[in-house]
């Protein structure tokens, strides 16, 4: 082999070797997650939509429940000890006198944690289960059985959400219903106390069945009645297509529907709500 030919072959091998090295050190192709085919078939909404629903659940459930913690403290106190706390005014005055203004805010930490997790899972889960159920049948059947889809999706979402909510709800109720000085008020020590005495407190899922008894009927009624109210507004009052109305009008319809729904659902869930408070008493 001549020197020229050997040089050409060496140069070719060097260029080939260089390309191999470059390809081996290049950044690998970015992996893109491909959802299962069944999920693509039954879930048609963008994942961002469900994240927005979860964020809305955190705000509407977590933040708002925390905002009304004083009312929750008064309610739980009256349910757990009706002999001492006979009325809203009496309860308010007694707590202020014995514990000061901060006594009305006890349990705000577990309240925020409990209802933020519950709200995120419930609202996102409701839309997810509703989307799956609607796409699992024909468009005609989905409309025909829409009320069944609403209540069953609400029940399924609440069933799951309450599992994540239960431990923090138990801490909240225990903090709010225990007599002053018998149980820690701060979130961390209260959580530790519940865990250390879990044989007695039944932490973390001791009140789950009572919670389901309160929340699942509440969710079924809430989502079913809410959807019916919205549909009633756009059928009997605002008779033009929904998209023809501005955002303020649509928001007003949502607010009014939610207001009516909240009142009705509060009545439905009240007996089980009292049971949850009684289960959190010190002597329970």
Image (spheres, rainbow, N blue to C red):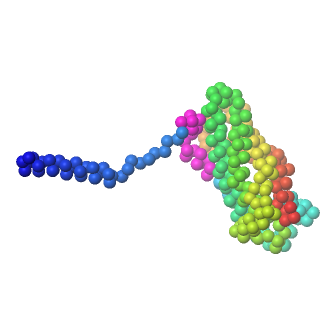
Looking at the image, which residue sits at the far front? 1
Q: Please say whether residue 60 is visible from this viewpoint.
A: no
Q: Residue at x 7, y 50 (%)?
A: 3
The magenta segment: 37-56
- Side of 22 relative to 108 (left or right): left
Question: For residue 45: magenta?
Answer: yes
Percent coordinates x, y for residue 244 in the rendering: 60, 35
Q: Please say whether residue 35 is visible from this viewpoint.
A: yes
Position of residue 135 relative to residue 184, above or below, is: above
Q: Residue at x 90, y 61 (%)?
A: 82
- Side of 101 relative to 136 (left or right): right
Q: Principal SS element in the magenta part?
A: helix
Position of residue 188 relative to residue 273, above or below, is: below
- Side of 32 relative to 141 (left or right): left
Q: Residue at x 65, y 38 (%)?
A: 130
Looking at the image, which residue sits at the far right? 83
Residue 16 or residue 237, whichever sits in front: 16
Q: Residue at x 59, y 45 (%)?
A: 50
Quarter location, residue 180: bottom right
Percent coordinates x, y for residue 62 in the rendering: 68, 56
Quarter location, residue 197: bottom right
Percent coordinates x, y for residue 202 in the rendering: 79, 60
Quadrant of the snapshot with the C terminus? bottom right
Residue 261 or residue 142, whichever sits in front: 142
Percent coordinates x, y for residue 128 in the rendering: 63, 41
Position of residue 185 relative to residue 263, above or below, is: below
Residue 15 or residue 206, whichever sits in front: 15
Quarter location, residue 177: bottom right
Question: For residue 77: magenta?
Answer: no
């Amino acid at each position: 082999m001549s020197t020229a030919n050997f040089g050409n072959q060496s140069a070719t091998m060097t260029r080939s070797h260089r390309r191999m090295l470059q390809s081996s050190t290049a950044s690998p192709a970015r992996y893109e997650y491909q959802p299962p085919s069944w999920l693509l078939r039954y879930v048609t909404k963008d994942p961002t939509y469900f994240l927005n629903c979860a964020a809305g659940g955190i705000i509407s459930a977590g933040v708002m429940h925390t905002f009304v913690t004083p009312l929750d403290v008064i309610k739980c106190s009256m349910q757990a000890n009706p002999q001492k706390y006979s009325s809203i005014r009496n309860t308010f005055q007694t707590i202020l006198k014995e514990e000061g203004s901060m006594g009305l805010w006890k349990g705000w930490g577990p309240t925020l944690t409990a209802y933020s997790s519950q709200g995120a899972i419930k609202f996102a889960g409701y839309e997810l289960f509703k989307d799956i159920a609607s796409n699992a049948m024909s468009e005609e059947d989905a409309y025909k059985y829409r009320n069944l889809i609403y209540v069953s999706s609400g029940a399924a979402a609440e069933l799951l959400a309450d599992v994540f909510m239960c431990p923090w709800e138990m801490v909240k109720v225990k903090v709010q219903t225990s007599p002053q000085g018998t149980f820690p008020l701060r979130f961390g020590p209260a959580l530790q106390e519940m865990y250390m005495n879990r044989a007695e407190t039944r932490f973390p899922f001791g009140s789950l069945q009572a919670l389901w008894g309160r929340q699942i009927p509440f969710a079924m009624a809430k989502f079913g009645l809410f959807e019916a109210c919205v549909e009633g507004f756009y059928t009997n009052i605002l008779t033009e297509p929904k998209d023809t109305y501005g955002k303020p009008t649509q928001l007003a319809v949502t607010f009014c529907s939610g207001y009516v729904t909240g009142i009705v659902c509060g009545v439905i869930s009240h007996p089980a709500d009292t049971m949850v408070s009684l289960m959190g008493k010190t002597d329970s």
